[in-house]
Image (spheres, rainbow, N blue to C red):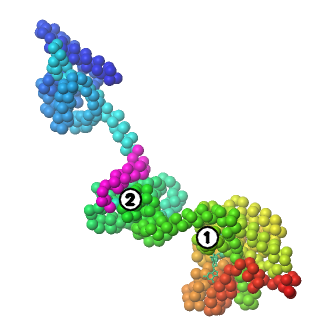
Amino acid sequence: MTSFSIILLIVLLVVGLRLLIIERSHRTIKRTHHHLQALINSIPDLTWVKDKESRFLLVNTQFSRAFGFAKEDIIGKTDFDISVDPEQAQGYYEDDMKTQKQRKTFHTEEQITGSDGTVGWSETIKVPVFDNHNQIVGTAGMARDITKRKHAEQKMVHLAYHDHLTDLPNRISFNQRITKLLNLNNCTVAVILFDLNNFKTINDSLGHTRGDEALVQISKRLKSLVDDNTIVARLSGDEFVIAHNYSKLENSLEKLQVALLQKFEAPVVLKEVNYNISASFGIAVAPQDGRDYETLLKHADLAMAQGKINKNNHCVHFIQKFADELLYKMRLSNQLHYGLEKQEFSLVYQPKIDSNTGALVGGESLLRWKTDNEQWISPADFIPIAEKNGFIIELGNWVIKSVLQQIRYWLDNNIQVVPVSINVSAIQLRQPTFADYLFQQLERYQIPGNLLEIELTEGVLMENIEEMITLLNKIRKKDIVISIDDFGTGYSSLSYLPQLPIDTLKIDRAFISNLHLNLDNQKIVQTIVSLANNFNLAVIAEGVETEEELAETRNCGINNVQGYYFSRPLPVSELENRWLNHTDNRMDS
Ligand code: C2E
Ligand code: CA
Ligand code: CA
């Protein structure tokens, strides 16, 4: 029914009422009243007529049903007599008075508490009733039940501001609420950002349904942290955030942190199996760490990243150093891309020595980067950044090309050539075109495969072992030597070794450092050596710095070593001068 038709009906009613008021014969009045009552009973909305004092003169069946009184018992009463909620009655009364005073139609949406206590919503229209002299004699009204629509609207609003899975406030809602908080004067607000550690593993191994279940369980626990000063929200996936206003509360942030950590103590139970789920937490506090939501969240995120590195299940507080480091990394990330064009990269070579004879048996190529402001950046710093921004592919290809070009130069100039190893990053190896590029460059510079070695870390091999075996077999067919770098630090799952087509284990420096003093490491190294012997693999020790370490590697049965004891990584010219035999005329002159 449109508002227009409602008003039309009300006008009808008013006319009917006036008929009631007009002096007529008793019978006529009675008949008219009868007709009028039948008419308004046919209206599905609550319908009524009141006198000037808001006393009911006429109500329909729907009205009497809603308020739980017989029609006769309502006539002559006011809303105060029949409403369960006196506040609502007061509201109805005031609206009646307003309608009379303004002498025009009044439109509102209001709450009605039914006789059974259920609270509903109605859309109400009230009109003033006039007598023949245009004097107000009362009001007439109609109320339509819009409870369903109201609930649907409320649900829509709720959905817009809450996360569907956990029913926690979502990012939009959090943003609005914390912004409001931050706008208050002298407010100390902590933002705690956290995400679940290794949540991807749960999703990948148990499926997304179980993953969702875990999130719901955790969220339920987190809801118990909510109070007048604490908002908990889910930002995305497994990322949650808490805003805590502790302006006037002593130690409350500390208490909250303890309570928060406790939420992760009990395992999450998925299909009757317990899973321990931990999280990494970062905290930023307004105003000192930022005054707006964006800054606080960014800083909490940086602190959280640090928390992931620390892995000690504590809340890490933001410090400016994190932001400085990030800025430094971002700058490096940008600069990296121009490094190749500007010829800022170079290679150094570290000799590999047969410690029994002192003879050079190979060399490892290592990247060096000197930026345009003459700063040397360590590969330990820039390789991870290049891996992240993808530049490692281009850079890695440059290394392959440069090393082969170098070997070609030595071959062409009758300079001694030993196998040179290159470090290949996981990202690079996983490129489908890796082997093709390698072979293409071998072909281009006409280099026999046995002069090239690639150093890979254990992690990359284990991730997709079947594919890796295929790839390594393909590479080995060209006689390229394959070694596992940093051996002993990664998975070190010895069971995979026999499956892999590899040639050399390169024992990590961590085991070689002070080897002569560390019995545990000696045992580990000896085990690695006998393992290698069993599988026909060569062994090399890296990071040999002292005579004692060298002697101990020999004790453990290692012949080939690399390290500062014999030589640091050297620029080509120095390598040629110090280590490579020249059989051409230059040597003799
Ligand atoms: P890595 O492959 O384990 O390389 C050995 C690192 O140990 C080199 O550091 C080398 O200079 C250093 N080193 C060698 N002997 C000793 C020693 O006796 N004592 C000590 N304290 N250190 C020694 P560098 O050149 O800074 O390289 C660090 C890491 O950067 C490398 O570790 C490797 O993972 C990566 N990297 C270097 N060049 C490349 C490259 O061309 N491609 C890729 N993907 N990674 C590279
Ligand atoms: Ca290496
Ligand atoms: Ca290494």
Q: Residue at x 75, y 72 (%)?
A: 403
SS of the residue at dot 2? loop
Q: Is residue 250 above or below residue 237?
A: below
Mark 1 Cα shell of 10 Å, populated few (<14), some (14-19), many (≥20)? few
Kind of residue sitting beneath label 1 = Asn
Q: Nearer the viewer, residue 521 or 431?
A: 431
Q: Is residue 49 above or below residue 392?
A: above
The answer, for residue 219, to whether it is visible in the render is no
Q: Nearer the viewer, residue 535 or 122?
A: 122
Give the quarter the ligand 3 occupies.
Answer: bottom right
Q: Earlier in the sequence, mark 1 or mark 2?
A: 2
Q: Nearer the viewer, residue 178 or 8?
A: 178
Mark 2: C-beta under 8 Å from nearest atom of ligand 1: no
Queried whether the magenta region covers residue 150, the answer comes back as no
Indicate the position of residue 369 as horizontal and vertical percent values: 65, 71
Range shown magenta: 160-188
**Residue 461's image quarter?**
bottom right
Q: Residue at x 17, y 22 (%)?
A: 138
Q: Residue at x 81, y 65 (%)?
A: 444
Residue tagged by mark 2?
A: 291
- The reply, left or right, for residue 383 in relation to residue 348 is left
SS of the residue at dot 1? loop
Residue tagged by mark 1?
A: 373
Queried whether the magenta region covers residue 162, the answer comes back as yes
Mark 2 Cα shell of 10 Å, populated few (<14), some (14-19), many (≥20)? some
**Residue 78's image quarter?**
top left
